Image (cartoon, rainbow, N blue to C red):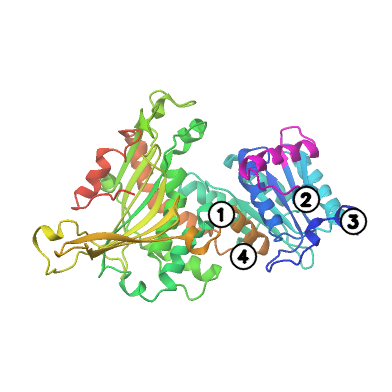
């Protein structure tokens, strides 16, 4: 037995179920923020929870010169920042022995020859069994090159008895429909679809998954989850922060590519989909694709009636004065890049015919909030009239994804007293108080599923392309007319976004 494993504290207690097989996670772009802030803390959490195999390793690759020990020190610093006061020295000591670093240029074939030899060495020394996860955390412009180099080095092949090879691709998956199809084609030259894991961390959030639990484990909701009872649906992804140090990235991406194409469209699919025959990858993803195919195409010459783009100016957030987007670092002074998007989407199928889905995503909003609000039709008739019903509103079911994870239902109820005044009140379920335990980090869930070979919460090729296809007319229209409406930081977006609902006699709810 390798000496490095003999005193591993992860051997000391009986394991929980669902521990992956031995393996190595290779992270391309490992010197970047994602590795230290998200990936390694999530892997550490799995180790602390006895969910990692003892024969496990991480190999980081990037051009930054670094030794194994320097890499470990960098990751420990990131872990202390993300898990302040909760890091176990014993677990870290065992976990960190499996952290390694190889400096190298991911464009050069010799980097992969060195990596291949090092992985074989780890198989012998740590017993990692030939199992590989290749995590692409690098610049999206390198995705195709890395895949090609892995294929040329014979590192993408899976042969019987030789272990698995899995590829993880971070968003954004392409910049538009054409580039997404091209990237899919490049990857499928060397990896089969079942080896590919396109990751959107939103799908790892407990409250996003709870959309499915709420719908399909409660008999009272599914019968009314349709156009007979639902007036409209609102999906909000609001952030109180600005672009910060990501100005250069945002100038290239914008809110439509950064948030709507992935996070928002995935939430839309989970909200609108039909019940899957089983909770497995094929069944779930088939139903999501059906939703994308049912979304009514937006004619390019009518984009203004269905889409609004905005950009934040200076303003006040939480009593602090903040600068406008054009004043942020690495942002052009005349930029029209959108930091806010609002869309009206129609799902043309039997369940949702005539029910608009209003979605919005933006930065420098008054608060951070991600929620799905299902507003039901008003009661057809009420015996209560006059001032006693002044506080009565339509029923609304709200699924709060963050920050206060939970579910809220707005209902009408009598106000205590001798009269008969009826008002709307909320029935709230807070996950933290209901289950008395902290929800795991999204990456923790997704990384574990990845190593277990469960692709249920990952995105299939036709999902990624389907989301781009819906948004393509909007992007093409905006590329010709680059104007973004303005809104003050600390507000809920431009006036044009309010008008998008106002034309239908509706208004945005206040999260």
Spatial separation of the CA atoms under disc 4 and disc 3: 30 Å
Residue 225 relative to residue 239: left or right: left
109 versus 195 height, above or below: above
Q: Earlier in the sequence, mark 4 or mark 1?
A: 1
Spatial separation of the CA atoms under disc 4 and disc 1: 15 Å
Q: Earlier in the sequence, mark 4 or mark 3?
A: 3
Spatial separation of the CA atoms under disc 4 and disc 2: 30 Å
Q: Nearer the viewer, residue 166 or 311?
A: 311
Spatial separation of the CA atoms under disc 3 and disc 1: 33 Å
The number of numbered discs placed on residues in the rendered structure image is: 4
- Give the SS element for disc 1: helix
- Give the SS element for disc 4: loop
Residue 304: say if magenta.
Answer: no
Residues at discs 4 and 1 in contact (Cβ within 8 Å):
no
Front disc: 4 or 2: 2
* Residue 467 visible in the shown view: no
At label 4, counting other C-alpha atoms closer than 10 Å, the crowd grade (few under 14, some 14-19, many 20 or more) is some
What is the x, y in percent for residue 461? Answer: 53, 58
At label 1, counting other C-alpha atoms closer than 10 Å, the crowd grade (few under 14, some 14-19, many 20 or more) is some
Spatial separation of the CA atoms under disc 1 and disc 2: 24 Å
- Give the SS element for disc 3: loop
Residue 62: say if magenta.
Answer: yes
Quadrant occupied by the N terminus: bottom right
Q: Which residue is mark 3?
A: 2
- Give the SS element for disc 2: helix
Q: Which residue is mark 1?
A: 442
**Magenta stretch in the rendered image:** 61-89
Residue 90: mark: 2
Residue 454: mark: 4
Q: Nearer the viewer, residue 91 or 446?
A: 91
Front disc: 1 or 2: 2
Front disc: 4 or 1: 1
């Amino acid at each position: 037995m390798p000496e490095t494993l003999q005193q591993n504290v992860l051997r000391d207690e009986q394991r929980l179920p669902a521990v992956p097989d031995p393996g190595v996670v290779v992270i391309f772009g490992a010197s970047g923020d994602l590795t230290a802030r998200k990936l390694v803390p999530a892997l550490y959490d799995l180790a602390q929870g006895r969910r990692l195999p003892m024969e496990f390793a991480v190999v980081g690759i990037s051009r930054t010169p670094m030794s194994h020990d320097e890499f470990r020190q960098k990751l420990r610093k990131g872990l202390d920042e993300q898990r302040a006061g909760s890091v176990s020295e014993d677990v870290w000591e065992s976990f960190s022995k499996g952290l390694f670093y190889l400096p190298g240029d991911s464009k050069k074939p010799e980097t992969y020859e060195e990596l291949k030899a090092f992985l074989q060495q780890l198989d012998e020394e740590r017993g990692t069994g030939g199992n590989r996860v290749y995590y692409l955390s690098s610049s999206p412009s390198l995705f195709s090159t890395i895949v090609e180099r892995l294929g040329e080095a014979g590192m993408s092949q899976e042969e019987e008895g030789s272990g698995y090879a899995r590829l993880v691709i971070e968003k954004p998956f392409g910049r538009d429909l054409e580039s997404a199809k091209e990237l899919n084609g490049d990857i499928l030259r060397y990896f089969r679809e079942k080896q590919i894991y396109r990751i959107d961390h939103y799908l790892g959030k407990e409250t996003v998954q709870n959309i499915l639990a709420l719908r399909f484990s409660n008999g009272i909701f599914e019968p009314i989850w349709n156009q007979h009872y639902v007036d409209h649906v609102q999906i909000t992804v609001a952030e109180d922060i600005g672009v910060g140090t990501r100005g250069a990235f945002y100038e290239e991406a914008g809110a439509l590519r950064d948030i709507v194409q992935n996070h928002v469209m995935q939430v839309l699919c989970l909200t609108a989909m039909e019940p899957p025959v089983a909770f497995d990858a094929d069944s779930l993803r088939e139903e999501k694709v059906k939703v994308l195919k049912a979304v009514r195409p937006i004619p390019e010459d009518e984009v203004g009636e269905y889409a609004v783009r905005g950009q934040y100016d200076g303003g006040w957030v939480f009593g602090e004065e903040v600068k406008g987007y054009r004043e942020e670092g690495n942002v052009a002074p005349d930029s029209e890049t959108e930091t806010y998007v609002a869309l009206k989407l129609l799902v043309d199928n039997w369940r949702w015919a005539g029910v608009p889905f209003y979605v919005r995503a933006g930065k420098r909003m008054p608060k951070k909030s991600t929620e799905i609000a299902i507003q039901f039709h008003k009661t057809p008739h009420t015996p209560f009239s006059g001032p006693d019903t002044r506080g009565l509103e339509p029923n609304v079911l709200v699924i709060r994804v963050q920050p206060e994870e939970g579910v809220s239902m707005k209902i009408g109820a009598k106000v205590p007293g001798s009269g008969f005044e009826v008002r709307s009140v909320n029935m709230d379920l807070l996950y933290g108080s209901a289950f008395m335990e902290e929800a795991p980090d999204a990456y923790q869930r997704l990384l574990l599923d990845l190593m277990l070979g469960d692709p249920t919460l990952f995105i299939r090729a036709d999902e990624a392309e389907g989301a781009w296809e819906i948004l393509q007319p909007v992007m093409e229209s905006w590329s010709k007319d680059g104007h973004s409406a303005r809104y003050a930081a600390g507000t809920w977006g431009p006036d044009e976004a309010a008008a998008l609902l106002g034309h239908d006699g509706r208004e945005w709810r206040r999260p």
